[in-house]
Image (cartoon, grey):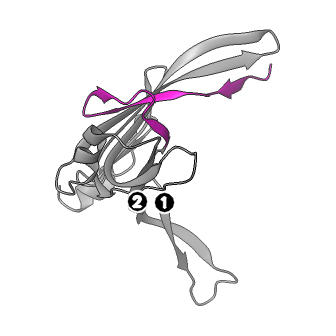
């Protein structure tokens, strides 16, 4: 089997369908982080960790300057926004670039911290905004990798609903 390397070196961010081309310096997207709890009991020689849910999700956008239209979004903690990050995965083998695959990351959330501006001599002003995320999805080449929605009690990985039995047991 030949080694294949994936590289993503750029992306564009959309908030509520509006492109932020060149306005954001970077984005850190939220991924489900599993909450694990220890289990220990009489007769056990050790301690085991078991899944207990998903921690709250947070995303970050680092702005490359001050943009009034972005400030109208980040300073309102009561409006949820839809975010889309679109990138291109370059796939390389020993024969060079073998494929270019679309990457799409979707999320819904509210800005919880607009971010303070950093003013420095002869440097661009930047700010880091924090987003509390309620819904997130990742697609590679049109295939859904995962979907997590805290309000709907949904967690789908590779097309398998991880919480179907849980919801059923709760009577949902």
Q: Is 128 drawn above or below residue 145 in the view shown?
A: below
Q: Earlier in the sequence, mark 1 or mark 2?
A: 1
SS class, disc 1: strand
Q: Which residue is mark 1?
A: 34
The span shown in magenta is 1-26
Horizontal side of 103 relative to 170 (left or right) equals right
Q: Nearer the viewer, residue 13 or 157?
A: 13
Most foreground residue, 140 or 87 = 87
Residue 81 left/right relative to 26: left
State yes or no: residue 94 in magenta: no
| Label drawn at residue 116 | 2
Q: Position of residue 94 (x, y in %)?
A: 82, 14
Which of the 4 image quadrants contains residue 95? Answer: top right
x then y, percent, for residue 17: 26, 28
Coordinates of residue 21 in the picture (x, y in percent): 42, 26
Q: Secondary structure at mark 2?
A: loop
Residue 12 magenta-highlighted: yes
Quadrant of the image for the N terminus? top right
Instruction: Choose top left, top right, bottom left or bottom right for residue 147.
Output: top left
Q: Are marks 1 and 2 in contact (CB under 8 Å)?
A: no
């Amino acid at each position: 089997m030949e080694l294949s390397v994936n590289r993503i070196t750029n992306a564009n961010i959309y908030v509520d369908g509006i492109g932020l081309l060149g306005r954001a310096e970077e984005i850190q997207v939220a991924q489900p982080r599993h909450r694990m709890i220890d289990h220990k009991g009489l007769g056990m020689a050790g301690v085991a960790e078991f899944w207990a849910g998903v921690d709250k999700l947070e995303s970050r956008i680092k702005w490359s300057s001050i943009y009034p239209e972005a400030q109208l979004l980040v300073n309102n903690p009561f409006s949820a926004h839809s975010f889309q990050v679109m990138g291109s995965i370059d796939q390389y083998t020993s024969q060079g670039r073998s494929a270019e695959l679309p990457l799409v990351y979707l999320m819904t959330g509210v800005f919880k911290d607009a971010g303070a501006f950093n003013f420095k001599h002869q440097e661009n002003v930047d700010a880091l905004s924090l987003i509390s995320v309620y819904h997130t999805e990742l697609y590679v080449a049109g295939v859904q990798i995962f979907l997590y929605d805290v309000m709907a009690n949904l967690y789908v990985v590779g097309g398998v609903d991880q919480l179907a039995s849980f919801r059923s047991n709760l009577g949902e």
